[in-house]
Amino acid sequence: MLPLSQSSGYAVLAMSCLEDPGGKPTLVVDVAAQTGFPRPYLSKMIHKLAKVGLVVAKRGNKGGVVLALAAHEITLDIIAEAVDGSEWRNQCLLGFKDCSDERACPSHTFWKAERDHIHRCLKDISLEEIRTFEHQSRTWRLADALPEKKAKPRAKKAAKPAAKKPAAKKPVAKRPGKTA
């Protein structure tokens, strides 16, 4: 079991497409196009993030979505908690419901230390870092996908010979003594 859900990962990527407060609002359709996420799913996620105060959504003309805080102030643990709640920090690696410090499964000690380490790391990674990484990745992928085009010398097609007119038939001289 991974500590974060796929929804948390989607939220991080979707939020990395948004402008800081005061920036130009981004339409959900545009975020869907950038991320490849289905628009209805993304709309629900944006609504959830707006409810917890991570994004500001405005409807209508000049509407769209912006971050409620500057990207450098939003950390991955804040996003994960907004999407998944805090329960992910207490889940058993093997999925046991009754795994705890009092009744520990074989992986409990290891997983508890790893979960704590992951949580500390998520607190240290800002949305700004993700945004920068994603921007560099998109630039790199685009450059990688479009190799330099070198003008290939085109082979000149051989000109078709001009159509020859059929030669006029010369009358055949009859040989004496031969009949047709």
Image: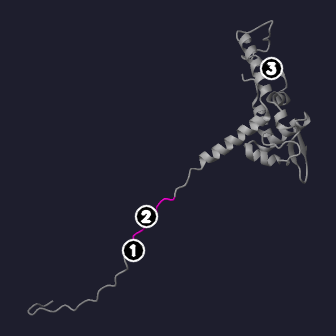
Q: Is residue 29 left or right of residue 22?
A: left
Specify the amino acid type for callout 2.
Answer: Ala
Which residues are drawn in magenta? 151-160
Q: Position of residue 134 (x, y in %)?
A: 71, 39
Q: Position of residue 26 (x, y in %)?
A: 83, 47
Q: Nearer the viewer, residue 15 or 103?
A: 15
Q: Which mark, residue 155?
A: 2
Specify the amino acid type for callout 1.
Answer: Lys
Q: Nearer the viewer, residue 132 or 122?
A: 132
What residue is pinned by disc 1? 160
Q: Is residue 119 left or right of residue 149?
A: right
Asked if residue 123 shows in the view, the reply is yes
Spatial CA span between label 2 and label 1: 15 Å
Count neighbours of disc 2 (C-alpha within 10 A) and say few if under 14, some if 14 to 19, many if 20 or more: few
- Upstream in the sequence, badge 1 or badge 3? 3
- Upstream in the sequence, badge 2 or badge 1? 2
Q: Circle 1 — which element?
A: loop
Asked if the residue at tag 2 contacts the one at tag 3, i.e. Cβ–Cβ closer than 8 Å, the answer is no
Residue 179: say if magenta.
no
Q: Is residue 143 left or right of residue 5?
A: left
Quarter of the image for residue 131 reads top right
Q: Nearer the viewer, residue 2 or 70?
A: 70
Q: Which mark, residue 151?
A: none
- Upstream in the sequence, badge 3 or badge 2? 3
Spatial CA span between label 3 and label 2: 66 Å
What residue is pinned by disc 3? 89
Asked if the residue at tag 1 contacts the one at tag 2, i.e. Cβ–Cβ closer than 8 Å, the answer is no
Specify the amino acid type for callout 3.
Answer: Arg
Q: Is residue 116 above or below residue 39?
A: above
Q: Circle 3 — which element?
A: helix
Residue located at (29% from left, 86% from top): 167
Spatial CA span between label 1 and label 3: 78 Å
